[in-house]
Every structure is written in C-alpha cells, then in structure tokens.
Image (cartoon, helix red, strand yellow):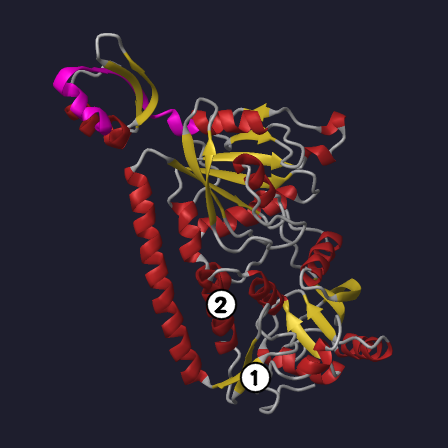
Amino acid sequence: MSDTIEDQAAPRAADGLHEVAAAPARALVLVPILKGRAVPGARDSETRVEEAVGLARAIDLDIVDGIAVPVAAPRPATLFGSGKVEEIAERVKAEHIDLVVVDGPLSPVQQRNLERGWKTKVIDRTGLILEIFGDRAQTAEGTLQVELAHLNYQRSRLVRSWTHLERQRGGFGFLGGPGETQIEADRRMIEERIARIERDLEDVATRRRQQRKTRKKGTQASVALVGYTNAGKSTLFNALTQDHVFAENLLFATLDPTLRRITLPHGGVAILSDTVGFIANLPTTLVAAFRGTLEEVQEADLILHVRDIARPDSDAQAADVASVLAELDVDVKAQDKVIEVWNKIDLLPEDKRPPRVIPAVAGGGPAVVTVSAMSGEGLSELLALIEEKITSARRTYAVTLQGEGLARLHRLYELGEVLDRADNPDGSTTAHVRVAPEKATAFLRTFPEAAA
C-alpha cells in the first residue's frame, strides 16, 4: 500500500459501527514489538500482551487472541510489513473478526490503510483507552474531561475531510453501538467545542480550588491515592474509609475523584482522595485532560503510592506512575510527602512477603507499608504512618482558658486540632491542641498562655 492523497483522509469513526455493535465484538489484539528499541526496565512481550488484552476486555470485547508482532522497521503506510498485513487479513476473514486493536499509536494514514487491508474496524491504544474512559466517566466533570481528550485526539486525525464524531452513552463511538447520535463536525466545529469544554472545566477547576482553599483553612490534612490502574486504590480507599466506592478488577475503574474522611489512630481526621489510575504510554492528551482532577495530588499534604506488589512488573508500573506525576511536578520519591503502599501481599507466598513496614533510608525512596486491602492486613500500620507523617511538623500545646478567656474557645478549633478537652471543677477548660506550622503564629498570638 502507498500513502496516496486518498489514503490521507481521516478515518471515519462511523465505518462499520453498526456491524460491530450487533453483539460483543470479536476482537484481535496486536502488540507491536519494535526490534532494536528495548528500553531498560521495559516489560516483556508477554506482560505487554496481557495488559493489552486486559484493556480490550475492559469494554466487554470478545477477545479471539492477543499476539505480539515483531516489527523490524515500522512502515509509514501500515506500520506492519506487507506480509504480516496479508497474514492478518486472512485471519480476520477466516475467524470473522469485527475489530483489530493495535496496542500502540497509529497515524490516520496507517489506521485507514489497515482498515482497508483487513476490511474491518481498527483502533489504536489511545482510541481504546478513550473508549474505556468514555464508559467509566460518571460525573459531568469526568464526562467533559474525557470528551476533551477525545476531541483533541480526533482533531489530530482530521486531514482534509469531514468526519463523524459519535457520542453514545458509555463510550465515544470508536466501537459504535445502538442508540448513538452522530455529530458531523469539521475542524472549526471541533475547535469551538474544545473551547467551550475548556471554559466549563476551568469553572469546575476554579470551584475545586476554592473548595481546597476552604479545606486548607481547617485542620484536616489531605491524603491522595495514586498508582497504576488496577493496583487496588479503590479497594484500599474503601477499606480505609469504610465506604463503598466502585472497586472491581477492572482497568480504570475510577475516573472521577472521590473524597472521604478517614479517622486516624489518635482521633485525628484527614481527607482521603481516590484518583484516576495511570498506565504505561498514557496519551499526553489524557494527562492534559485530567490535569484539573490531578490537582488533588499536587495539593495533597501526603501521597500514598499504591503498588500491586504481586505483579512481576511492579517496578515498571511504579516507573510509569512516577513519569506521569513528574509532568505534574510531583516527585513520588519525596520521603517527606510519600508513602509507598505495597498492596495485595495476600497473593504472595508467606515466605516471599516483605516486612510489614520498611522505613525510609537517607538518600533512598519513601517509607513502605505492605498491606492487603482485601483482607485488612497492614492497614493499622498504614494509618499509624499516615498520622505520623502529617503530624510530624505539628506541635502540640496545652491551653487553659477561664473567665473571659472562655470566649476564645471556638478559636482553638479554628486554629488547631483539639486532641482532648476537659472542663475543670473551677469552671476553667483545658485542651491539648495540635497546630500546623502555617497557623502557629496566629495560634500563639491568640493564645499567649499556651504551653508546648
């Protein structure tokens, strides 16, 4: 195949939609393995195929097979060599495959040519992740964020022709389905829609910043969960908060941020937030779209980096999370702000389990707590370390108020965290108050009688 002008027309997302949607689509997953481009610490082909198949299953596709395909030299027109394209075409026809998922980026030209050569629908890794995100988004903000990413992706694929952008409940139309509405849009219409969504998201971001500012005025520290998708963040969130946030063995089960209070061992309270999971080669358009949501991570007093320690590629997953967070100027190796939570230790043999707590060492990474969010193992140690981290810079003062001084009692709660309070027989009140560094000056000015 050659890169003709006709080939350069943007692929129409509507092609073959209704044929694919009649039943769970039979899908073939291809993982291109570029020869001579090995990256230190990169996943092996088997692990990559496993993840790619997991992504495809996340939207209920009927996976016929997942295979690694060596690529000696990427072809501009088709990515794969002509022999491999013909081989796949024969298999698509023989096994009645409705959809081919290529686990990597495809240019508009490559996608169009492969669809013509294989006579079936083709989507790349970005398109698949966008489809999953479209299915998972629950709130208005999440839906807007996904649509923004979808439009930016589609805009990059407009070459000269009009295209169809499908919107349907639970997805963004790459795979199609019943009940969808088609929006015929050119570049100008996409740009206008992007501008509107960005304005709406900025309004949401402004409200969220105001809410964070209000929380900061209080005494409750903020703790954010981050980690690779399916590492068990939502299960851990539920275990720590006694809540019932959606948590399944699914990739990207959580897209919209969820905030709940957690109670610490000595009665203190913190705000815990669950955030979107990360994944290898996460498209930059998606990182940008979820930047507003991920501000919860940037502004957090403490970050819990949740890792599935039972996976052989746990280190590689951790590196991927660190890479994405680095774009947000968040260092997951910062000892004062991060705790690594090694989850799913219940899946490890007893003799292979690491210690419950691994303290941070000078010049090394953050402290580690090993847990099982499912069984509850290690959660008490984790909560104790969370409390230690967020209170380490806070001093505790004893304050006794009497007579007219009792009028200042409410200020104890505004400027600090009241750990205990006793009403004495002589009518005075004594309280022990933990005070954050940024409020220490105001506290001591208001309560000069406070004793450390």
Quadrant assignment, res 13: bottom right
Q: Is residue 435 above or below residue 220?
A: above
Number of marks in picture: 2
Q: Residue 336 at what x, y percent from top left? A: 42, 31
Q: Earlier in the sequence, mark 2 or mark 1?
A: 1
Q: CA distance from mark 2 to mark 1?
A: 17 Å
Q: Write the residue at 18% across / 29% down.
A: 442
Q: Residue 216 at what x, y percent from top left? A: 31, 40
Q: Write the residue at 58% across / 58% down.
A: 281
**Element at label 2:** helix
* Residue 41 as seen in the image, left or right of residue 149: right
**Element at label 1:** loop
Q: Amino acid at mark 1?
A: Ala
The image quadrant where one finds the N terminus is bottom right
* Residue 299 as seen in the image, left or right of residue 55: left
Pick the residue in front: 342 or 31.
342
Q: Which residue is mark 1?
A: 10
Q: Amino acid at mark 2?
A: Ala
Q: Specify the segment rendered in magenta.
A: 389-411
Quadrant assignment, res 18: bottom right
Q: Is residue 410 above or below residue 111?
A: above
Q: Is residue 351 above or below residue 189?
A: above
* Residue 418 as seen in the image, left or right of residue 101: left
In the rendered structure, does residue 259 fall within the stretch colored magenta? no
Q: Which residue is mark 2?
A: 149
Return the residue found at the far right.
Answer: 94
Q: Mark number for residue 326?
A: none
* Residue 116 as seen in the image, left or right of residue 295: right
Q: Is any atom of residue 359 visible in this view?
A: yes
Return the residue found at the far top.
Answer: 425
Mark 2 neighbour density, 10 Å: few (under 14) some (14–19) many (20 or more): many
Q: Is any atom of residue 361 visible in this view?
A: no
